[in-house]
Image: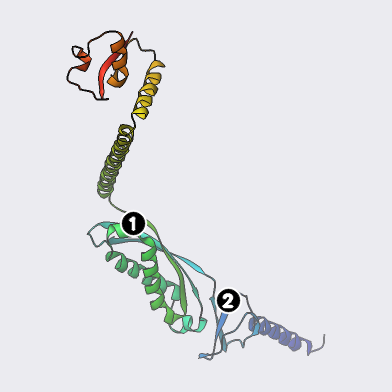
Amino acid sequence: MPFWSVPVSAAVVVIGILAWLSIKVIPQYERGVVFRLGKLRPVYEPGLHLLIPGVDRLQRVDTRVVTLTIPPQEVITKDNVPARVNAVVLFNVIRPTEAIMEVENYAVATSQIAQTTLRSVLGRADLDTLLAHRDDLNAALREIIETLTNPWGVHVNLVEIKDVEIPEQMQRAMAREAEAERERRAKVINARGELQASEELRQAADTLSRSPASLQLRYLQTLLELGADQNSTVVFPLPMDIVGPLLGKLGVNGAHSPASAGFNGSSAPNAAAERH
């Protein structure tokens, strides 16, 4: 073996190791922040890049949306109700250089800002707002967190309140309140129904009173409905306009008839027909 083969082989191995250390591939969803001898260089875009080993230092920044779960926070609402609230924050890095240069760990910093903002915003809202107007609270939380994280190159896409836990005693009180509200609505609806029904009956009575023929047809219809039932005895009032001629033919004296007592020439019901 020639004497020069060993140094050449060693040089080839060293060059191969240096080439392996200097070649870096950055995926499409990442960006590379490179420092050369401690000095910041332009951001490396996705693709193949060569770095000088021992001189260049690469930090990868993921630009995909990150799901951050905020642990349950103890809050006191505006109306002094204790509650445990947790939320989720969706964010992503839009400026990789600032995410590395402006903050030590942008993910941890965003999490801490989200927790403090959650306690602060929910502490200024009452329980009804917390339960019924989450969209407004979510928008307010996102706006505040976005303002604080924007200098770090972090964009907040969404803040969503997930669960709200309140004490069991407060849950029972809310259940009683909801039940009382439902009963109140039922009574109001029932009263409105009776009012509308009485108004319709009054209008029907006015219409029938202006037309005696319609009133007699109504009596006949009622008789037909009663006749369909299996009743042994039916007592039904009849107007004197119908009963009068029949009594006259039978020779009954209207002046001494009980049916005409207290009544003088009116079409109102003053007689009763009994069917066995």
Q: Which label was assigned to residue 38?
A: none
Dot 1, crowdedness within 10 Å: few (<14), some or many (≥20)? Answer: few
Amino acid, disc 2: Glu
Q: Residue at x 57, y 87 (%)?
A: 56
- In this orientation, does residue 207 appear? yes
State how the image is colored.
rainbow
> Could you say where residue 197 lies in the image, as x and y percent from the top left?
31, 37
> Could you say where residue 27 lies in the image, as x and y percent from the top left?
62, 75
Residue 180 is left or right of residue 105, and the answer is left
Q: Is residue 217 above or below residue 31?
A: above
Regarding mark 2 in the picture, which secondary structure is present there?
Answer: strand
Mark 1 = which residue?
131
Question: Depth check: 238 or 151 in front?
Answer: 238
Q: Residue at x 30, y 53 (%)?
A: 166
Q: Residue furthest left?
A: 262
Amino acid, disc 1: Leu
Mark 2 = which residue?
30
| Mark 1 in CB contact with mark 2 (< 8 angstroms) | no
The quarter holding residue 253 reads: top left
Q: Residue at x 78, y 90 (%)?
A: 4
How far apart are labels 1 and 2 at the CA level? 39 Å
* Total labels drawn: 2
> Could you say where residue 146 lies in the image, as x and y percent from the top left?
41, 75
Residue 127 is left or right of residue 57, and the answer is left
